[in-house]
Image: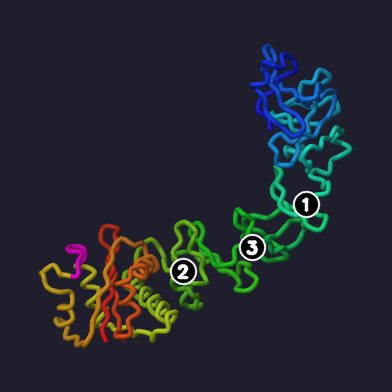
């Protein structure tokens, strides 16, 4: 589509300022007509004295333009026959650019009043088509309209104007959310401080939960982290508010540990309060010295002896800087040594500590048998 407009004269000079299209070339006028455009069919003729459908960007979707008797395209005005064209010259209705499918090497010369079915099909092939309003899908000699359709593994809905729906939408009394790509969101998701809980089968929104209430809600409703889409910016399946509840975060790590163990055919670990108290103390020590060696220079496991915890086997995982329980577990599960502790069959008990200092979270897992 054009940005400025001009007319026929000095073709050799104007060639360097041309824009290509099927069956012809857009050309810009020479001074004093450098603000005008005309359309050269590259065969000694040019568009003039009426309406022409022209595909200027080779996407097989043409816009309609009006040319005066001298061949200059009209723009930003009302045409002699009473239609509106925008600043680029394209015919508009209520501010919407009108389009029509136009196969390569096919041209149209017609009055838009006789062809107001914007985007009308002309032996279209199956697939996606875009115009200034949005995307449509052509199938079985028609554009999908007022219906659901699964395409390439994703579910889409097309409204009564045949356009793909995006964003929040009410369909048959239920509310749904569609990605910017048009694909239906099929997992509970987070957006702008709210978790939107979806029906497991039909994916409509059944509840909206403020992030400050999320931790309690997902526990009360037994929502598995794998059923939540955490890809949205700022989302964290386990997060509640921006004020960290350290003990809550620690317990959530414990829950994820047992989910990972179940996925790997390991027995669950049990939560040990005394071990958790040791892990919490170790998390606070990490601020001073991030190491399996304590600030006093002794091994991390001396804290177990100090608290009269007996064991035959013990392990410790530490981390800092992760944003929440899922993030720290992802870090540990992507490290062979930490993962080995988490999945070890030698351990039967676990305690987890979480400590926040200056906005940074410090994490500790202690395992014993």
The residue labelled by disc 1 is: 125
Q: Quadrant of residue 39?
A: top right
Q: Position of residue 80 (x, y in %)?
A: 84, 24
**Relative depth, front residue between 326 and 209:** 326
> Most extreme residue toward the top, as rendered?
32
For the residues labelled 3 and 1, the Cα–Cα distance comes to 20 Å
The residue labelled by disc 2 is: 214
Q: For label 2, count other residues whose C-alpha is less than 10 Å away and answer few (under 14), some (14-19) or many (20+).
A: many
Which numbered disc, 3 or 2, marks the residue closer to the eye? Answer: 3
Q: Quadrant of the N terminus?
A: top right
Which circle's residue, 2 or 1, is located before the other in the chain?
1
User: Was residue 291 drawn as part of the magenta stretch in this picture?
Assistant: yes
Q: Residue at x 44, y 79 (%)?
A: 263
The residue labelled by disc 3 is: 154
Q: Quadrant of residue 172?
A: bottom right
Which circle's residue, 3 or 2, is located before the other in the chain?
3
**Relative depth, front residue between 267 and 112:** 267
Per the rendered image, the range of residues in magenta is 286-292
Circle 3 — which element? strand
Q: Position of residue 124 (x, y in %)?
A: 80, 49
């Amino acid at each position: 589509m054009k940005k400025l407009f001009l007319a026929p004269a000095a073709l050799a000079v104007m060639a360097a300022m041309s824009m290509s299209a099927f069956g012809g070339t857009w050309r810009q006028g020479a001074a004093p007509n450098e603000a005008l455009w005309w359309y050269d069919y590259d065969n000694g003729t040019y568009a003039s004295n009426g309406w022409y459908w022209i595909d200027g960007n080779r996407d097989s979707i043409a816009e309609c333009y009006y040319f005066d008797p001298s061949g200059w395209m009209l723009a930003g005005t009302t045409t002699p026959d009473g239609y509106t064209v925008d600043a680029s010259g394209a015919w508009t209705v209520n501010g919407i650019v009108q389009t029509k499918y136009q196969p390569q090497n096919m041209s149209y010369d017609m009055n838009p009043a006789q062809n107001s079915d914007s985007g009308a099909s002309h032996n279209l092939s199956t697939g996606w088509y875009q115009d200034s309003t949005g995307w449509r899908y052509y199938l079985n000699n028609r554009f999908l309209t007022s219906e659901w359709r699964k395409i390439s593994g994703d579910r889409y809905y097309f409204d009564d104007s045949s356009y793909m729906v995006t964003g929040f939408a009410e369909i048959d009394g239920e509310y749904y959310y569609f990605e910017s790509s048009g694909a239906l969101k099929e997992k509970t998701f987070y957006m702008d401080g709210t978790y939107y809980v979806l029906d497991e089968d039909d994916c409509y929104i059944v509840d909206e939960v403020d992030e400050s209430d999320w931790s309690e809600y997902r526990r009360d409703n037994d929502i598995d982290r794998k059923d939540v889409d955490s890809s949205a910016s700022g989302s964290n399946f386990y997060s509640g508010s921006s004020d960290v509840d350290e003990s809550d975060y620690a317990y959530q790590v414990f829950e994820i540990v047992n989910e990972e163990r179940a996925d790997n055919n390991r027995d669950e670990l049990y939560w040990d309060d005394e071990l958790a108290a040791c892990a919490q103390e170790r998390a606070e020590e990490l601020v001073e010295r991030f190491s399996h060696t304590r600030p006093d220079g002794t091994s991390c496991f001396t804290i177990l002896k100090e608290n009269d915890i007996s064991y035959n086997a013990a392990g410790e995982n530490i981390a800092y800087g992760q944003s929440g329980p899922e993030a720290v577990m992802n870090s540990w599960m992507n490290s062979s040594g930490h993962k080995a502790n988490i999945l070890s069959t030698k351990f039967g008990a676990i305690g987890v500590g979480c400590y926040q200092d200056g906005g940074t979270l410090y994490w500790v897992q202690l395992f014993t048998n």
